[in-house]
Structure formats: structure tokens, C-alpha cells
Image (cartoon, rainbow, N blue to C red):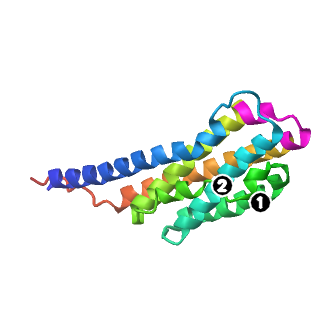
Amino acid sequence: MKTLSKTVRLSRLGTLVVATFVLTGAAGRAMAAPSTQEAGPLDDAQIADRVLAFNRAEVQTADAVKRKLSTPPVWQLAQRMTVDDSAVDRQLGSLAGAGQQSGGDGQAAGADLSSLSGDALENAYVDREIQTHQTMLNALDGQLIPSAKSEDLRRRLNDVRAQTAAQLEEAQRVQHTLKVNELLAQPPDPVGTL
């Protein structure tokens, strides 16, 4: 019985690892735009475009998964992404280039979660949020904020950085909660059974 219980847990873990691996690749593709170095320095409109592309992808992904989420902390995280990132869109929209007035390429980020449901979806979504926010923080610190020429844009990017860091912390708390709940839901191994 003890071996069967461990096998079931390993099977669950394997499913989660595969889902996370698939999602990680997708998140990397979705985040390539904000962190990819272009030839030559970025101008302020290009910087705003990158931040807006990230935020729009976050809103689209959150909107796509919210109706399928059943755990309150995960739903609240998705709701926060929708509200916070929509506000950034309004703040930076006037600084973006003409190409950003369309919806951007955020649809691809949400499509990779479309085949998942239940715990697998919730875990994959939270893992995605952690990875994309870490990547965005690296892009903000390493390229976008230092490249900003306008003081107004630099100030707004610092606000976006603070918001992104807060969202990352919330996603990490939700991930911890999910892991604790998963451990608590598992039946205890009977002690002394053969």
C-alpha cells in the first residue's frame, strides 16, 4: 500500500512537471520581446511598447483562465493581473509607438494553458506568473529602465517595477499555498502496515 501511494504521488508530480515544462517554453516565447536585446539603443516608445506587450499578454492570459479557476487565491491573482496591468496600459499608452495600439501578441501566452484544467491549470498558471514576472523584472532592471531617456517614463517604469515585484511576491505566496494544500490533501501513509 505504501508503494502504491508513492507511485500515485510520483505520477501526479510527473504530470505537473510535464505541464510546467510545456508552459515554461511558452512563457519564454511570450517574454522574448521584453528581454531581447535589439541592435542599437531603445527609444522611449520602444520601451513603452515592450512593457505594454507584457501587460497585455498578462491581461489576456488572466482573462482566458479566470473562468476555469476554482481556488480563490489563484482566481484573485488572475483578477489582480487584469486590474493592475490594465491600469499600466492606460498610463503608458500615450508613450507607446503606433504599433502598440492593437492588441499585441498576448493571445499566444494564454493559448498554452487552454488544454489544462483543474489543479494542473492552476499550478501551471501560477508557475507561469512567477517566471514571466521574474523575466520582466530582469528586463526592467537590465535594459528598459536604464535605457529610458525621459524622466517621466523612467518614473513610470519604476512604478511598473514595484508593481511587478509585488505581483511576483503574491504569485509566490499563492504557489506556496497551493503546495501546502496539495500536501494536506494527500492521505497520510499508514505507519506500521505491511
Q: Is residue 13 left or right of residue 43?
A: left
Say which quarter of the image contains residue 189: bottom left
- What residue sits right under mark 1 in the picture? 87
Residue 128: x and y in percent read 52, 50
Say which quarter of the image contains residue 33: top right
Residue 161: x and y in percent read 73, 43
Between discs 1 and 2, the one toward the N terminus = 1
Q: Looking at the image, which residue sits at the far top?
A: 40
Residue at 44 percent across and 55 percent down: it is 180
Secondary structure that dominates the magenta span: helix
Q: Decide: is 39 above or below 71.
A: above
**Amino acid on which disc 1 is placed:** Ala
Quarter in which the N terminus is drawn: bottom left
Q: Report crowding for label 2: few under 14, some 14 to 19, many 20 or more residues within 10 A (C-alpha).
A: some
Q: Magenta stretch: give its range.
A: 143-154
Q: Decide: is 46 above or below 3.
A: above
Q: Residue 145 magenta-drawn?
A: yes
- What residue sits right under mark 2 in the picture? 104
Secondary structure category for the residue under label 2: loop
Q: Report crowding for label 1: few under 14, some 14 to 19, many 20 or more residues within 10 A (C-alpha).
A: few
Q: Residue 69 magenta-drawn?
A: no
